[in-house]
Image: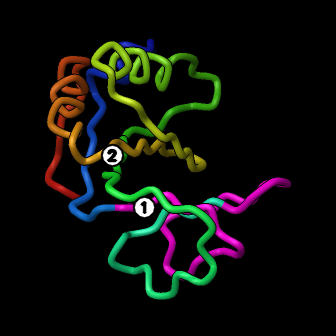
């Protein structure tokens, strides 16, 4: 399948909740995602689930998660590049998290309506909130 076909057949969901991106001393319980590398621990967590701030080094709140409901083969090139370029052309920054078969982007809440419209312009269909 060609790259354009993934956009024509693709769907996305916007989570209702607001999330925070956290630099933490240790993984936070109930996080959506935890990224541990040699330099730091980053947690993406529903803001309402942050109970104890003692393990938080830095926090950036007010993010919404968009999940792309399309399974992308590892050899496919350009899916996120096209999304990133399209959103960047509108001045919308993203934070990307990929799992084995699904890509997720986080977008600041104040840009979500504009971002949704740009994703629709690529041919992706918005589904009910996640």
Q: Quick check: 66 above or below 93?
A: below
Residue at which label 2 appears: 66
| CA neighbours of label 2 inside 10 A, class few (<14), some (14 to 19), many (20+) | many
Query: Seen in the image, is 117 located left or right of residue 97?
Result: left
Please tell me whether mark 2 or mark 1 is closer to you in this view.
1
Outermost residue, bottom direction?
A: 52
Among the 4 quarters of the image, the one containing residue 88:
top left
| CA neighbours of label 1 inside 10 A, class few (<14), some (14 to 19), many (20+) | many
Among the 4 quarters of the image, the one containing residue 19:
bottom left
Q: Residue at x 15, y 27 (%)?
A: 117
Picture mark count: 2
Instruction: Pick whichever, 65 or 20, lies toward us.
Output: 20
Q: Quick check: 56 above or below 88?
A: below
| SS for dot 1 | strand
Image colouring: rainbow
Decide whether residue 33 is among the magenta residues. Answer: yes
* Disc 2 to disc 1, C-alpha distance: 14 Å
* Quarter placement of the N terminus: top left
Question: Tag on residue 79?
Answer: none
Q: Residue at x 22, y 21 (%)?
A: 123
Residue at which label 1 appears: 20
Decide whether residue 91 is among the magenta residues. Answer: no
Q: Residue at x 18, y 56 (%)?
A: 129
Mark 2 or mark 1: name the one nearer the start of the chain: 1
Range of the magenta residues?
19-41
Q: Give the percent coordinates (x, y) of residue 102.
A: 48, 45
Q: Quick check: 15 above or below 123?
A: below
| SS for dot 2 | strand
Q: Give the percent coordinates (x, y) of residue 34.
A: 62, 64
* Quarter placement of the C terminus: bottom left
Q: Give the percent coordinates (x, y) of residue 41.
A: 70, 62
């Amino acid at each position: 399948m060609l790259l354009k076909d993934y956009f024509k057949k693709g769907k996305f969901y916007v989570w209702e909740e607001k999330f925070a991106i956290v630099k933490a001393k240790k993984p936070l319980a109930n996080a959506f995602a935890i990224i541990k590398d040699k330099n730091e621990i980053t947690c993406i967590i529903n803001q309402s689930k942050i109970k104890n701030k003692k393990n938080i080094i830095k926090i950036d709140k007010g993010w919404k998660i968009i999940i792309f409901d399309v399974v992308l083969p590892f050899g496919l090139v350009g899916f996120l590049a096209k999304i990133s370029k399209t959103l960047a052309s509108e001045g919308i920054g993203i934070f990307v998290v990929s799992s084995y078969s699904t890509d997720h982007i986080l977008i600041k809440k104040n840009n979500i309506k504009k971002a949704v419209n740009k994703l629709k312009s690529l041919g992706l269909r918005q589904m009910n909130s996640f």
